Image (tube, rainbow, N blue to C red):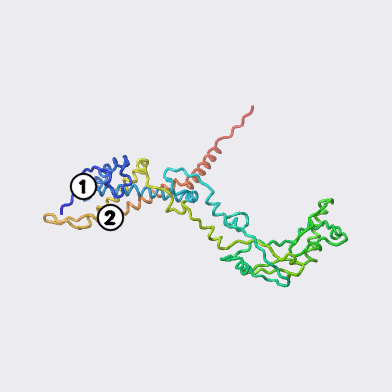
Amino acid sequence: MNIPIYPGSSSFIPGNTPFGFYDYDYQFQIDADKVTTFVARRLGYPIMEVELQDLNFYAAFEEAVTTYGNELYAYQVRDNMLSLEGAPTSSNLNNALITPNMATIIRLSQQYASEAGAGGNVTYYSGALALTPGVQEYDLGTWAISQSISGGIEIKSVFYQNLPAVSQMYAPFGGFAGLGGVPAAGLYGGMYGGGYGGGYLMMPVAYDAAVVQGIELSNTIRLSAYTFNIINNKIKVFPIPADQDVRDGYLFFEYIKVQERLTNGLVQTNTVTNPSNAPYGNPVYTQINSVGRQWIYEYCLALCKEMLGYVRGKYSTVPIPDQNMTLNQSDLLTAATAEKTALIERLRLYFDETSKKSLLERRSQESDFRKQEINNVPMVIYIG
């Protein structure tokens, strides 16, 4: 079978590449034949025959351009992913100037705001638990089921608080605590806490502060220590509620639905959610500068060496008059593998050196060097 090989020239037309990514790019059309000539001569043509066709060269050229674009935009995604998450997937970011933003960082921080009760993406609900005289422990899980809440709840705060001492300083039924009459703390303590709300503080601030401290100490020692404890969705109130403590009948609290903590963190959108759907396309060949094109030429040569090695590997030796000729399949494959690896490493290193982090570090070092140089300049004293 007589299969034609590279004849020494080629003529590219759209449709000659496997995918046609760049077939209608005018500069790609011009360079396709130039690259074919360059690679063929580097492989030994015309001294040696090159067992490839122009379609092989075009395929390698297209792959080299695409590989360059993949490495470039993979680097761009790594460098900008925090700013890209949430951006529309419909836009092409090949030539976009991306300004860093706090959107993703704030979204990641919402969980802390939710736990602190200072915002976030989990709704706080209010609930009320009926208290029963003589009953100290109540099952919040049973209460949640009675409210048709599935997945459980998590209590964030209980609206139980002692009356602030400063609101107990004025007692309309007996005067100041500790100064005769009925202590205000004795009138307004209890499970819920509540105060008269009036106060005519005419004494010096130092006196008022001393009275507040006295009331707080009195409440701690003389009154019942109303508090609560929650373990495994069971709330225990201290002391055991009495009739006067449950006059309103309920203990109020705030809670979140555990299931919402999970579901609110899963939002289905048509936006960038991971590196695979970041809206980068194949590069525009015309816009690639000479540095990038030189890398593409060299990578194309490595790919063609690899293809030629596989072709020549079909026959390890070729019979000629009086002897056999050994082909260099092994040398071609070894060289192609090493060159491809070195080229990829060189490109990635180049991109890393131009990352935001590296550029800022370099600028910081340059600033330090300038300061050191300026410090070596003699300081002149001007007398005017």
x, y (%) of residue 206?
81, 52
Quadrant in which the N terminus appears: bottom left
Seen from the viewer's position, the closer of residues 96 and 259 is: 259
Seen from the viewer's position, the closer of residues 364 and 15 is: 15
Distance CA(mark 1)–CA(mark 2): 20 Å
Residue assigned mark 1:
6
Quadrant in which the C terminus appears: top right
Extreme residue toward the top, this view = 384
Q: Picture quarter containing residue 379? A: top right
x, y (%) of residue 44?
23, 47
Mark 2 neighbour class, 10 Å CA radius: few under 14, some 14 to 19, many 20 or more: many
Task: Give the residue displayed 52% in from the left and 51% down from the top.
Answer: 104
Q: Secondary structure at mark 1?
A: loop
Seen from the viewer's position, the closer of residues 62 and 264 is: 264
Three-letter code for the amino acid on which mark 1 is drawn: Tyr
Three-letter code for the amino acid on which mark 2 is drawn: Leu
x, y (%) of residue 174?
86, 59
Tell me if 50 is positioned left or right of 195 in this view: left
Residue assigned mark 2:
333
Task: Give the residue displayed 80% in from the left and 66% down from the top.
Answer: 222
Tell me if 89 is positioned left or right of 206 in this view: left
x, y (%) of residue 6?
21, 47
Q: Earlier in the sequence, mark 1 or mark 2?
A: 1
